[in-house]
Image (cartoon, rainbow, N blue to C red):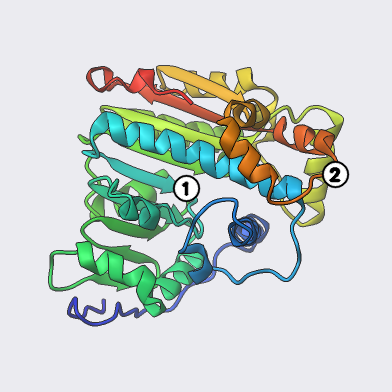
Amino acid sequence: MATRQRESSITSCSSASSCDADDEGVRGTCEDASLCKRFAVSIGYWHDPYIQHFVRLSKERKAPEINRGYFARVHGVSQLIKAFLRKTECHCQIINLGAGMDTTFWRLKDEDLLPSKYYEVDFPMIVTRKLHSIKCKPPLSSPILELHSEDTLQMDGHILDSKRYAVIGADLRDLSELEEKLKKCNMNTQLPTLLIAECVLVYMTPEQSANLLKWAANSFEAAMFINYEQVNMGDRFGQIMIENLRRRQCDLAGVETCKSLESQKERLLSNGWETASAVDMMELYNRLPRAEVSRVESLEFLDEMELLEQLMRHYCLCWATKGGNELGLKEITY
């Protein structure tokens, strides 16, 4: 495994192996989400100076309702992450499952809100691409090296492990492999742990996602789980969403768990979590500070508010806690 002195650029060695072709459609959603975030950032929905280093700016203009949906998603997840960091005073770890080209690590560092360690997990093919960007772009690599106290940094095609940040190529359906790789990167089961899954569980079968949730609940003494994904998928609008994804060879294998907010909460409670909450994204959007809503809505004209509402009612933000009573994890809310 290649190592170099901290002062030099991050260096990569082994080549990426191909993943199961059946997962190609799911991997494609990473690119779609990254392009959408990149476009929304470019017109001012939120500040993210790092996304440009992972994905090009699309020539295709994204619809205003898509941009507002991503704004609500990023805002909602960020608020819960920061609430967890405040409760634990950053003496914790974060594990982002299916992280894709997410930039939360860098943005938290800029705000001086980093946990003890931040982990990302995704398909090896996606991790290889992300590590290539980190290796080649100093604005991404420098913050990692700056926090890394050792003289050498371990990195190959499917893994980067540093003092405060790790990226791991693994299949979330293989829990023994996942746990083994996390422990090799010094995952600490005694630390309060926040796990994040954004549009991840819905691509797993109900049994697979239940196993992942059980593993997460059973592995840490104090933990919180954030899940962002589809909801209310039994109606006509939900069926159209499913059909559109199927046309792109992307099957929502876990859609039956996305029937309602209640079914989302029940899944969490039945798999080892002690508390569970859920809001649809329209409710979350309506709770935003009015000044922020006015700012966002001034960015571009939205012709059909009804379409935005339909879209937002079919996505939700869920969070669950286990243990951590002395930290007040159960008090965390949006």
Considering only vertical position in the picture, is 217 above or below 293? above
Nearer the observer, 102 or 289: 289
Write down the quadrant of residue 3 in the picture: bottom left
Mark 2 lies on a secondary structure that is loop
Rendering coords of residue 167 (x, y %): 37, 59
Type of amino acid at the residue the image marks with label 2: Asp
Gap between marks 2 and 1 measured at Cα: 40 Å
Which residue occupies 45% across, 36% down? 79
Most foreground residue, 320 or 251: 320
Give the image location of residue 242, x and y in percent: 78, 42
Residue appearing at x 25%, y 27% in the figure? 221
Q: Looking at the image, is 54 positioned above or below residue 169?
A: below
Q: Residue at the spot x=58%, y=58% of the render?
A: 41
Could you tell which of marks 2 and 1 lies nearer the N-terminus? 1
Q: Is residue 128 above or below residue 195?
A: below
Q: Quadrant of the N terminus?
A: bottom left
Q: Residues within 10 Å of mark 2 (few under 14, many from 20)?
A: few
Does residue 187 appear in the picture of this structure? yes
Residue to which mark 2 is pinned: 303
Give coordinates of residue 181: x percent, y percent. Answer: 32, 54
Image coords of residue 179 (percent x, y): 33, 46
Q: Which residue is mark 1?
A: 172
Three-letter amino acid code at disc 1?
Leu
